[in-house]
Amino acid sequence: MGLLYGLIAVGLALIFGLMDVVNFAHGEFLMLAMYVTFFLFTFFAIDPLLSAPLAAAALFVLGAAVYLVIVRFAMRAKANVGMVQIFATFGLAIVMRGLAQLFFTADYRSVPNSWLGGKTVSVAGIYLPQPQLFGALVAIAAFGGLYLFINRTDFGRALEATREDPGAVALVGIDKNRVFALGWGLGGALVGLAGAIMATFFYIYPDVGASFALIAYVTVALGGFGSVFGAFAGGIVVGLVEATTALILPPSLKSVGIYAVYLLVVFIRPRGLFGSM
Amino acid sequence: MLSVHEVTTAYQGLVAISAVSIEVAKGEIVCVAGANGAGKSTLLKSIAGAERPRSGTVTFDGNRIDGKPQHIITAGGIAYVPENRRLFPRLSVRDNLRLGSYLYRGTPDREQPLELVFKLFPRLSERLEQRAETLSGGEQQMLAIGRALMTRPRLLMLDEPSQGIMPKLVDEIFQAVKRIRDAGMTVLIVEQRMSECLEIADRAYILQTGRVLMQGSASEMMTNPDVRKAYLGL
């Protein structure tokens, strides 16, 4: 579960690191990815395992479009740019939730009988649920892919350069808007992957993103804002803390541990575990 | 090659340059001098597309470029090294140079200008793995010029290349500018240190409070008594 939290958080950290914008609609991106998976399964009988790349692609397009149509203009605000950005993405979150309620209804949906759903695998006598295990593998693969993309490709280097100084990339002929759109697309694609996997073991409803988004913010803050690696590590920490809390406290209180650890880290090391700011 | 015609640029209503016209011919080194706040940097920004002129036109090789986005102007053959250099501080020297050739990604001779860059600034080749922020001021200026050369410009624009650099390196950089011109490029320099600049320049303009005060060949400027008194401190 921690790796999935990490996967959700990485998208957030990527966008924040790139342009200091917090995407408050990140949870709604996740919600939409889950619905995409649900509809592909229900209408076309495409198993989430296969539709995960489709969900990622759909969310890539959504992410890039959100930047080009909304955030790009929010960033042009003459005063109080930070506030304008917060309200723009927060407003988007509310709109997306409302539209989901309107079109998808508030019913709880699920993807029953998927290839992995409900199955477990026994590793040395410990039963592990297959969807979560598969999710962990996908998350690791996605991190690996992202790492290679950022460190080995020209576009990745352009991403790093834009993160360093968005005002300077035009000096070498890079269009910062394209890089930002790509960053939002990538952030969307990562949360799209996470959503596709989570659809196999979690109920799908319009508000589903909220609780996960909250954990994602904690994860990003824990790992250090803007640090993609930190978000990954933060996700693992959050997952472990949650699992441990569930052992000690009643399951309904399992989130308490996460926030307790978060408070502790914020008090002791405000920049997060791996933050450089 | 470059023709700036009656360009006026303002920041939040404050006019920084007013109806400035300059010409730069192919193969020239042109120096724009003037005191702080005379509008020198604004002039370069208006050409590079970092600022949008309020009125007037900028023509480069026969094409209007005023109002075009900055990255398009860079791709069109004008490299601009701003005053504060704007390197990517936490990236290595190598990555900074490589980003300079971003426009030529996927082409086999992508790093072709690198040979010239290393010939001009051999120190850069010794510091390839170092982060740009760890370089001295002079080395950072060299890297900024090197990165600009990687975009294969026809016109190179430098904003105060001597700023914050020890005197010995200033000379090295001005000599490099000469060699860049000899390699076939045209150079437009903005400088407060007029005497060094005039030594390598073909022609010069003097800006004062946003207007062109004087223009002429470098040798004319150097012998003009008013210029000598006001700008060269002689």
Image: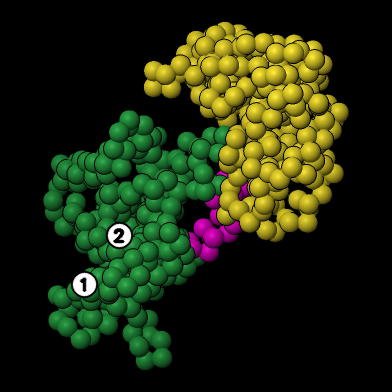
Chain colours: A green, B yellow
Eye-nearest disc, 1 or 2: 2
Give percent across and percent down for residue B132.
Answer: 63, 52
What label does residue A255 carry, if any?
Answer: 1
Mark 2 packing: few (<14 Cα in 10 Å), some, or many (20+)? Answer: many
Query: Relative to the observer, which residue lies in front, B136 or A223?
Result: B136
Secondary structure found at label 1: helix
Residue at 76% over, 30% down: B196
Estimate the spatial distance between the alpha carbons at disc 1 and disc 2, rounded to whole Å: 13 Å
Residue identified by numbered label 2: A217
B213 in relation to A80, above or below: above
Main SS, magenta region, reads helix
Q: Is residue A235 visible?
A: no
Amino acid type, mark 1 = Ser
Q: Can you say which quadrant of the picture contains the C terminus of chain A?
A: bottom left
**Which circle's residue, 1 or 2, is located before the other in the chain?**
2
The quarter of the picture where residue B211 lies is: top right
Secondary structure found at label 2: helix
In magenta, the rendered stretch is A142-160
Q: Does residue A45 belong to the magenta stretch? A: no
Co-location on one chain, circles 1 and 2: yes
Amino acid type, mark 2 = Tyr
Give percent across and percent down for residue A150.
Answer: 56, 54
**Would residue A234 appear left or right of A158 to someone viewing this image?**
left
The quarter of the picture where residue B108 lies is: top right
